[in-house]
Image: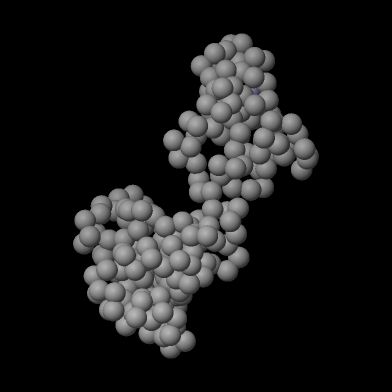
Amino acid sequence: MSIINYYNETIGENKVNKIIHAYGVNNQSKYLERMHKVYLKSNGVKLPKKGKLRIALEYLVKNMGKPVHIDDIKEYVINEGETLTGTDPLQVRHLSTQNGFYIVKGNNKYEHKLITLICELPGFIKEKRNISINNKIWKSIMKEYDYMCVNCGSKQDDELRWKKTEITKLQKGHMDPRKGLTEDNCIPQCQFCNQRSKDKHVFDKRGQVIEII
Ligand SMILES: [Zn+2]
């Protein structure tokens, strides 16, 4: 029997651990990839390829349907060879809010519970899947705009067009300041224009103001 059929037959009884067992106890990773491909990918859910969040997710898969404490997740992640540093080193909630996995709070704010891998977090919509902009994405955005401010045309590292005493440093501007800074909501602006429009204007891709808030 294929793992998917097996899953479909047993989901009503929530015998998830049996499924994982059928797939190989230490193979949450492959199981997760398979489920993601079949059920979640087309709905915009993003599977971390590797790293601490991926390992945390695998631990949640292993404990699907049960609330697990953040300290247990951290311990597991560290045992798998990751280093956790900083004040808030493991943002498990990103797996749901940004990646779209159906993970909810457990009995308290320190517990996380993975509900299922056959559907995404309710309310998670594709538009939200563009995660925050990393360096690579930001570089590609600047390149798309020829390293110029979308509003005034000031060029990166040249003098500002309207304030010639300053050097242009392009900033990640929001097209719509009410939304998160994602790839599809980002335009390059010089510090002058970014400051001037701050949270008041909604722009289109070409930097035209389409709404005043
Ligand atoms: Zn500008």
Q: Quadrant of residue 13?
A: bottom left
Snapshot colouring: one colour
Location of residue 136 in the rendering, given as x and y in whole percent from the top left corner: 44, 35
From the viewer's perspective, tell me whether residue 211 is left or right of residue 51. Answer: right
Identify whether 166 is placed above or below 38.
Answer: above
From the viewer's perspective, tell me whether residue 24 is left or right of residue 150. Answer: left
Residue 191 or residue 41, whichever sits in front: 41
Residue 118 visible within the image: yes
Q: From the image, which quarter does the N terminus lie in?
A: bottom left
Residue at image location 50% in from the left, 49% down from the top: 131
Residue 24 or residue 84, whichever sits in front: 24
Residue 108 visible within the image: no
Residue at image location 63% in from the left, 39% down from the top: 174
Residue 13 or residue 82, whichever sits in front: 13
Q: In which of the image's four quarters is ligand 1 placed?
A: top right
Residue 3 or residue 126, whichever sits in front: 3
Residue at image location 35% in from the left, 58% down from the top: 54
Q: From the image, which quarter does the C terminus lie in?
A: top right
Location of residue 130 in the rendering, given as x and y in whole percent from the top left corner: 53, 48
Identify whether 155 is placed above or below 133.
Answer: above
Location of residue 171 in the rendering, given as x and y in whole percent from the top left corner: 55, 30
Q: How many marks?
A: 0
